[in-house]
Image (cartoon, rainbow, N blue to C red):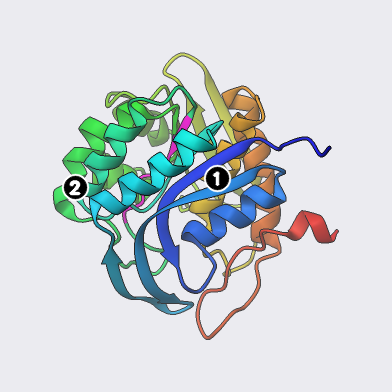
Amino acid sequence: MTTRPPLVLTVAGSDSGGGAGIQADLKAMLALGVHGMSVLTAVTAQNSRGVHGVWELPEEAVRAQYRAVVDDIGVHAVKTGMLATAPLVETVAELLADTTAPVVVDPVGVSKHGDPLLAASALESVRKRLLPTATVATPNLDEVTQLTGVRVEREADMRTAAEAILAYGPRWVLVKGGHLPTGAEAVDLLTDGTEEHWLRAPRQDNRHTHGTGCTLASAVAAGLARGLAVPEAVREAKAYVTGAIAAGFALGEGIGPVDHGWALRR
């Protein structure tokens, strides 16, 4: 009999182009040896050039999907992505408050192309309800500013950004510094307010990076589901995403996706 893999649930929106969102999450989970399951929060009409339409699902549909999976199958880790509106954020936060599984919160605010994916009215719900459920929160620099007002212009500012996010209650925060002009390295800061882990990797000369944030958060959740400690799960996830960015490929006329299966084709 085949051993059942660890179970990871993603609660996020759909990307019809397949590079980000639910589609990216499930690809990353498969590549990293866990069984991915999904709760769909929104449908987007999206391609390599941007987001052309967004349709949120009703709260009852999100709640029903979550309960159907968790109550029957169970879960070893949960990852959240695009939640779009305050009612959806509140619904998901309420569901997560009852789980004992580790939770990775990717506070998705805008798409790679700059399209808004979170209503301004939902920010307070993310701060006060969603972030306190997180084992690890994974904001990028724009999301840090959106949530806290802190602007990160140099590496030293990342510590201030992390402190501002931790004030909302997550156990750990991973501040992603990929957009920071730090030369040859992409640097991230992982901290729980006591421990600090500075994670560095060579910056990849590839514009095809669609889905990077979704993929990283899903990779962290996969590691946690497999029983890794947070620092080890994040290090492993960063290595996986660095390879996926390096192998990112052109798709359509705009920004292509990272390659979730890069390690399987080496």
Image coordinates of residue 42 in percent, x first then y, are 34, 61
> Dot 2 surroundings within 10 Å: few (below 14), some, or many (20 or more)?
some
Check the picture and name the quadrant holding the C terminus: bottom right
Q: Quadrant of residue 237?
A: top right
Farthest residue in the top direction?
194
Residue 159 or residue 39, whichever sits in front = 39
Residue at left offset 66%, top offset 58%: 260
| Magenta stretch encompasses residue 144 | no
**Residue 125: percent from left, percent from top:** 20, 39
- In this rendered view, identify the residue nearer to me: 147 or 22: 22
Q: Can residue 97 be seen in this view?
A: yes
In the rendered view, does 159 fall on the left or right side of 215? left
Position of residue 4 measured from the top left corner of the image (x, y, whole percent): 72, 36
Q: Residues within 10 Å of mark 1 (few under 14, many from 20)?
A: many
Measured along the vertical axis of the image, is residue 209 above or below residue 138? below
Label whose residue precedes the other's in the sequence (2 or 1): 2
Q: Which amino acid does label 1 sit on?
A: Ser
Question: Which quadrant would the N terminus be assigned to in this image?
Answer: top right
Indicate the secondary structure of the residue bearing disc 1.
helix
Q: Which mark is residue 218?
A: 1
| Circle number at residue 181 | none
Question: Which residue: 64% across, 34% down?
Answer: 223
Q: Could you tell me how many numbered marks the image carries?
A: 2
Instruction: Give the residue at x 36% y 67%.
Output: 43
Say if the magenta span includes residue 108: yes
Please give the range of residues in magenta: 103-109
- The residue at which mark 2 appears reads as 87
Extreme residue toward the bottom, this view: 253
- Per the model, the C-alpha gap separating discs 2 and 1 is 23 Å
Q: Which amino acid does label 2 sit on?
A: Pro
Q: Mark 2 falls on what kind of element?
A: helix
Q: Which of 221 and 120 is in front in this view?
A: 221
